[in-house]
């Protein structure tokens, strides 16, 4: 058990992993065992050739050091939770600033919403040099993983460190932003940090209160943030070449395919509904099967349709995450069934077609079964397809490392979704270990995969420099 850093795992980590794997379906366990064999081969080959992922180890260690900071109530249990503007959150910001300064950034500051912004200037001989924007978030969900968001901060820092170490400047500036808030945990204002960069910070959020009754305004004042300066954070897209983001995949796809990196084609658009089927509660013993108006069966039929309809697209996903018979009883035919719908697809047209079919089917099921169906839309997010030129730059960078180019959509939302509204963007995914589990303490990536992520970004930067120089 040499683990993701090649230095071993703690006893607690080994036990947690086995506890999780005990319930695995044999197919899943076989795939995971094969991944481990592959990892052992990787480590032994690297040993034999004296290959050390120096950059990857550095990036891995930065994550580990940052994960020391956790909010009270979680820190005591060894859990990682960093929510907006807590002491742990501010300690993270201070530590990221320090890492940036030590890496050789020219200017580092914390902005009006708590983002840590590091700038590495362009070659002074480059005329009207633009800037490449990159970054991700450093807040976490409750009891989250160490890599979600943070990889997208530390990978570019490693690139700047290497440039600075070699005394190199590129014909464009690099701006790395460690976003203060993405997960919407303390306040219901997800993406407020990247939103501020596109002028989408909503001033009414300032009056929102956290669970302890502290308003966002108070939290910001206490952190010494200049609230009045928030509108000034809006970037002028004309100053930028585009936005790129590295992120742990947070899913099982790359792990299952045994691929360390994947190029994101689009951040899926999504729509959410809460709904209810209302039939007739009746005696489970005396109501014949052809006389029932079973609301739960209607919901179950819709759930199976979701599965079939989304699979038809290949890359759409549809989930009924909640299914609840309020006041249900073992001997009563369900009269009501409340449910949720979460529908996502890589582009809005595909998503909308999926939604239209699902809504139509819900009505058909209701009519045929004699149950009423109500649906209420609760969330809508448009898809953010990757900019073709930037996606190709990532693809070339991945191919240059001798890796197969694998493309996949992002099922989860990311900061890139916000920047998408004002500039071209594309993301790179890094494989997660433990079956790709995320928003969970078992989230993991190896130092070797991080090394590949840094090398891919370095390659992208070099190619971009050559492109701009017209080579
Ligand atoms: Zn994230």
Image: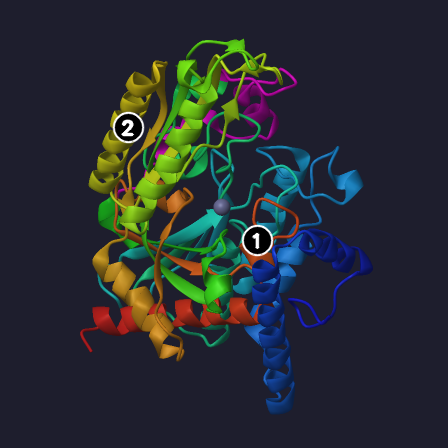
Residue 257: x and y in percent read: 46, 66
Q: Is residue 167 visible?
A: yes
Which disc, if any, is residue 193?
Answer: none
The image shows residue 439, relative to residue 6, as above or below, that is: above
Which of 12/277 is in front? 277
Position above or below: 118 against 223 = below
The local secondary structure at tag 2 comes to helix
The magenta stretch spans residue 420: no
Whether residues under marks 1 and 2 lie with C-beta atoms below 8 angstroms apart, the answer is: no
In the rendering, which numbered label is found on residue 361? 2
**Which quarter of the image is occupied by the C terminus?**
bottom left
Q: Nearer the viewer, residue 228 or 324?
A: 324
Residue 213 is one of the magenta-drawn residues: yes
Q: How many marks?
A: 2
Q: Residue at x 62, y 70 (%)?
A: 36
> Is the residue marked by circle 1 packed among few (<14), some (14-19), or many (20+) residues within 10 Å?
many
Query: Which residue extends farthest left?
Result: 470
Instruction: Residue 448 in the image: state x and y as whole percent.
Output: 56, 72
User: Which residue, given by chain and number where applicable, does mark 1 sit on?
Assistant: 147
Q: Position of residue 433 (x, y in %)?
A: 58, 61
In front here: 232 or 41? 41
- Indicate the position of residue 394 as horizontal and vertical percent values: 33, 65
In this orientation, does residue 177 appear? Answer: no
Residue range corresponding to the magenta coloring: 207-236
Q: Residue furthest bottom?
A: 49
């Amino acid at each position: 058990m040499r683990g993701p850093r090649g230095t071993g795992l703690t006893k607690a980590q080994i036990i947690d992993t086995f506890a999780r794997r005990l319930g695995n379906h044999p197919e899943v366990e076989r795939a995971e065992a094969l991944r481990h064999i592959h990892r052992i081969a990787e480590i032994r080959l690297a040993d034999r050739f004296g290959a050390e992922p120096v950059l990857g180890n550095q990036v891995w260690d930065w994550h580990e050091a940052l994960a020391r900071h956790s909010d009270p109530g979680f820190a005591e249990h060894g859990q990682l939770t960093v929510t907006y503007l807590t002491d742990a959150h501010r300690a993270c910001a201070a530590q990221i600033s320090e890492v940036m300064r030590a890496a050789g950034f020219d200017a580092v500051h914390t902005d009006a919403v708590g983002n840590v912004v590091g700038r590495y200037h362009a070659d002074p001989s480059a005329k009207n040099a633009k800037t490449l924007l990159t970054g991700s978030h450093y807040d976490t969900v409750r009891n989250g993983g160490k890599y979600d968001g943070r990889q997208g901060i530390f990978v570019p820092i490693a690139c700047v460190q290497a440039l600075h170490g070699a005394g190199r400047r590129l014909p464009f500036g690099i701006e790395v932003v460690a976003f203060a808030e993405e997960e919407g945990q303390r306040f219901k204002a997800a993406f407020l940090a990247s939103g501020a960069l596109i002028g989408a910070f909503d001033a009414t959020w300032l009056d929102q209160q956290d669970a302890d009754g502290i308003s966002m305004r108070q939290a910001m004042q206490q952190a010494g943030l200049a609230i009045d300066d928030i509108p000034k954070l809006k970037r002028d897209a004309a100053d930028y070449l585009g936005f790129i983001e590295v992120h742990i995949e947070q899913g099982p796809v790359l792990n299952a395919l045994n691929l360390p990196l994947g190029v994101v084609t689009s951040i899926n658009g999504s729509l959410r509904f809460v709904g209810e089927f209302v039939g007739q509660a009746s005696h489970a013993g005396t109501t014949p099967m052809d006389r029932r108006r079973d609301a739960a069966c209607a919901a179950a039929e819709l759930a199976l349709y979701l599965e079939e309809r989304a699979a038809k697209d290949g890359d759409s996903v549809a989930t009924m995450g909640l299914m609840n018979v309020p006041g249900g009883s073992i001997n009563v035919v369900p009269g009501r069934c409340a449910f949720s719908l979460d529908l996502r697809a890589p582009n809005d047209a595909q998503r909308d077609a999926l939604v239209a079919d699902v809504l139509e089917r819900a009505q058909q099921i209701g009519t045929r079964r004699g149950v009423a169906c109500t649906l209420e839309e609760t969330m809508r997010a448009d898809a953010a397809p990757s900019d073709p030129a930037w996606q190709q730059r990532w693809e070339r960078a991945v191919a240059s490392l001798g890796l197969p180019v694998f493309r996949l959509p992002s099922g989860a939302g990311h900061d890139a979704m916000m920047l998408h509204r004002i500039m071209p963007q594309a993301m790179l995914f890094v494989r997660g270990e433990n079956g790709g589990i995320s928003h969970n303490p078992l989230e993991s990536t190896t130092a070797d995969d991080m090394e590949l992520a840094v090398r891919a970004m370095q390659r992208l930067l070099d190619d971009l420099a050559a492109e701009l120089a017209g080579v």
